Image (spheres, rainbow, N blue to C red):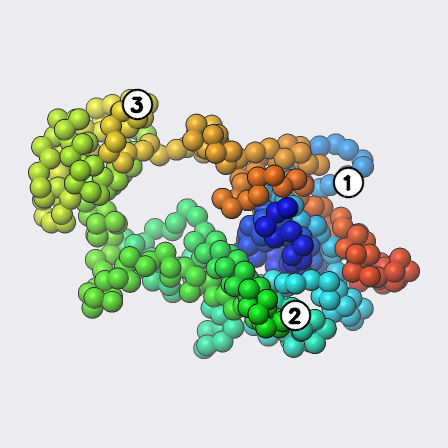
């Protein structure tokens, strides 16, 4: 039995943060039912699109690869919450769930007559997790934003440095918010075990992003101002930096401790001085010498070197290499999942139950009838909701 077998989650979120959180929970065995609006989650329609395998049975449409990566092991029901019958249906539906995850701006659920108080009146044990950019209160709670805005307000781009700081190639606040949502939900479930009552989990993606800057916050605690982009872990040391190889690939040297840099230096013929791992004006010249060394061999030669010498050296994996990496293959970090869109490459979350039966990402509304039947709606009631276009299949 999976760790979260029997836990039922109603996911009202869209795009990345909420769906990533529910992916982690689904991989642990939770039942996750996504409530999508007519037309489905916005992410379904964004590039890159994956065309379905021709098969009249499925009737699937072109769907975003990112959506297909985030939504395995979930069901989908489509409800029009702008219709009164749709709102009433959702209020009744929450009786069947332990957790609701939502990602609206503060106050939107209230305007839909689906406030937390209304939801918990139907189900006092309900845990409601809200993921927003700036949290449920404060002067900026209503501000719009995206990952780049949140990591800016969180101080991460300021800690990173650069004129101006470069845009990261990955979503920090979105994923950080999702992970803290999972932690908050699991803690709330534990609290409910003690009290028998549901509670709210308020996740600010900006605050979630701050955790990635914890090393720099240590400077603030010591009443020092971090030197943006010029600390031991942000580029100040030759021993902890990236370099180009003979064939113009990239390598990452992470020899923070003197023993590791000494091992590297001795193996390549450099002097391993005592100040090599200390910040200072000598570092640029040392970095230039190390760059010359890395330019002397190809990436494949440095891979072989790293296997022989224990010095914290890795080549930078290309997207093409990632799924073929021997370590990732041995750990089964990636797998293929049969679906109406063909065999889909999937990343396995680190805490996933390895014995869990994997299910294809859903078509929008694929499980509308199934979800409502499970919640106690009669076939006649479902037919009426479908006729009113409050429920779509």
- Residue 336: percent from the left, percent from the top? 60, 33
With respect to residue 305, does 222 lie above or below? below
Q: Which of marks 3 and 2 is nearer the N terminus?
A: 2
Q: Is mark 3 on a helix, strand or loop?
A: helix
Instruction: Relative to 9, say whether 324 is above or below.
Output: above
| Mark 2 closeness class: few <14, some 14–19, many ≥20 residues within 10 Å | many
Above or below for 36 versus 144: above
Res. 113 in view: no
**How far is disc 3 from disc 2 in space, using C-alphas?**
56 Å
- Circle 1 sits on which residue? 59
Residue count near mark 3 (Cα–Cα under 10 Å), binned few <14, some 14–19, many ≥20: few
Q: Residue at x 15, y 34 (%)?
A: 262
> In the image, which is nearer the foreground, mark 3 or mark 2?
2
- Residue at numbered disc 3: 304
Give x and y (percent) for residue 202.
Answer: 52, 69
Q: Is residue 97 left or right of residue 169?
A: right
Marks 1 and 3: which is nearer the front? 3
Toward which corner of the image does residue 310 lie, by quadrant? top left
Looking at the image, which residue is at 43% across and 53% down?
A: 172
Cα gap from disc 1 to disc 2, whole angstroms: 38 Å
Decide which of 213, 97 is in the foreground and name it.
97
Point 17% across, 26% down: residue: 267
CA–CA distance in space, label 1 to label 3: 49 Å
Q: Which of 344 and 60 is in front in this view?
A: 344
| Sequence-first disc among 1 and 2 | 1
**x and y percentages locating residue 130 in the rendered image:** 56, 66
Q: What element carries label 2?
A: loop
Residue nearest the observer in this picture, 213 or 36 = 213
Mark 2 — residue?
125
């Amino acid at each position: 039995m999976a760790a979260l077998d029997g836990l039922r989650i109603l996911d009202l979120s869209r795009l990345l943060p909420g769906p990533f959180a529910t992916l982690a929970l689904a991989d642990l065995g939770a039942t996750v039912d996504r409530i999508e609006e007519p037309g489905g989650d916005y992410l379904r329609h964004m590039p890159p699109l994956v065309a379905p395998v021709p098969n009249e049975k499925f009737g699937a449409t072109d769907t975003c690869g990112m959506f297909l990566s985030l939504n395995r092991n979930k069901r989908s029901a489509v409800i029009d919450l702008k219709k009164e019958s749709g709102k009433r249906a959702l209020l009744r539906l929450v009786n069947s769930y332990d957790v609701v995850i939502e990602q609206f701006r503060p106050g939107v659920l209230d305007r839909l007559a689906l406030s937390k108080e209304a939801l918990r009146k139907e189900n006092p044990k309900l845990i409601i997790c809200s993921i927003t950019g700036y949290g449920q209160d404060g002067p900026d709670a209503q501000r719009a934003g995206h990952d780049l805005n949140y990591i800016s307000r969180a101080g991460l781009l300021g800690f990173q440095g650069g004129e101006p700081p470069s845009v990261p190639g990955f979503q920090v606040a979105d994923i950080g918010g999702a992970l803290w949502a999972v932690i908050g939900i699991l803690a709330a479930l534990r609290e409910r075990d003690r009290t028998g009552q549901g509670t709210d989990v308020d996740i600010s993606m900006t605050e979630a992003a701050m955790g990635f800057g914890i090393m720099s916050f240590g400077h603030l605690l010591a009443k020092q101002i971090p030197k943006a982009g010029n600390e031991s872990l942000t580029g100040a040391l030759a021993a902890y930096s990236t370099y180009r190889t003979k064939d113009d690939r990239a390598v990452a040297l992470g020899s923070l401790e003197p023993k590791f840099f000494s091992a590297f230096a001795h193996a390549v013929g450099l002097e391993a001085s005592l100040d090599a791992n200390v910040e200072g004006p000598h570092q640029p010249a040392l970095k230039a010498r190390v760059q010359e060394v890395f330019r002397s061999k190809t990436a494949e030669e440095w891979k072989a070197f790293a296997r022989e010498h224990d010095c914290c050296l890795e080549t930078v994996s290309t997207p093409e290499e990632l799924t073929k990496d021997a370590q990732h293959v041995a750990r089964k970090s990636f797998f293929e999942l049969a679906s109406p869109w063909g065999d889909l490459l999937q990343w396995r979350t680190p805490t996933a139950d390895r014995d869990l039966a994997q299910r294809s990402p859903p078509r929008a509304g694929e499980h509308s009838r199934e979800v409502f039947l499970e919640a106690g709606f009669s076939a006649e009631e479902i037919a009426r909701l479908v006729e009113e276009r409050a429920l779509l299949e």
